[in-house]
Image (tube, rainbow, N blue to C red):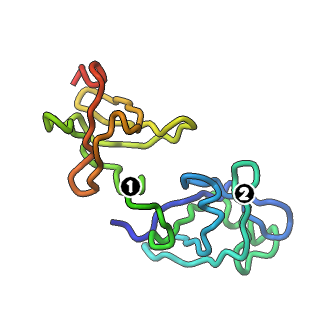
Amino acid sequence: MKQYLSCARAVNTHGVAGLIKLESWCDSPKVLADIKTLYLEKGGEYIPKKVEKSSVFKNMVLCKLEGCNTFEDAILFKNQIFYCDRSDLDIGEDKVFIEDIIGLEVINADTKKVYGVLENVINNPANDIYEIKTPTGIAYMPAVNEFIASIDTEKGIFVRPIEGMFDEI
């Protein structure tokens, strides 16, 4: 498993005092705002950037990094992807990181039939949607307890789909 997980993208600056506006890729902007060290990836190395302060603002995170004190400093981060160390996040035992399940097989929990591979997780206000690459195309499945029997980051995503969800496979 990856030690560093993508968690945000710098979409712009905010003001003239070095604030960076981050688009959160976490469960909520609050989760991102609570992270004390962010990382930038350069040539396979992860460079730490200490967060001096951050806050949620209009579903984004305004972040002040150590040494980033002017608009000119902040603009250099625009469109950069930020990472966090997985050990800095406490997600609980019943949850998984999206990066850990992308690429896993989606398998019927009862028949063991493989439907395809998880390509993407679409964040939706009501619930996440799994985008599954099947032999015949792309299928979509709500990521809800009614359909997901279990997730094993080594073996796959075990599901119990409703009738018709994967009929074309």
| Residue depicted at 74% across the width and 75% down the height | 68
Quadrant in which the N terminus appears: bottom left
Quadrant in which the C terminus appears: top left
Q: Between marks 2 and 1, how big is the CA–CA gap? A: 26 Å
Q: Which mark is residue 56?
A: 2
**In the displayed structure, would residue 164 be above or below residue 158?**
above
| Residue depicted at 21% across the width and 52% down the height | 155
| Amino acid carrying mark 2 in the image | Val
Which residue is at the front of the view, 7 or 135?
7
| Amino acid carrying mark 1 in the image | Asp
Which residue is at the front of the view, 49 or 151?
151
| Residue depicted at 64% across the width and 78% down the height | 50
Among numbered discs 2 and 1, the one appearing first in the sequence: 2
Counting from the top left corner in percent of width and height, residue 114 is at 18, 37
Residue indicated by mark 1: 94
Q: Is residue 74 left or right of residue 25?
A: right
Residue 11: quadrant of the picture: bottom right
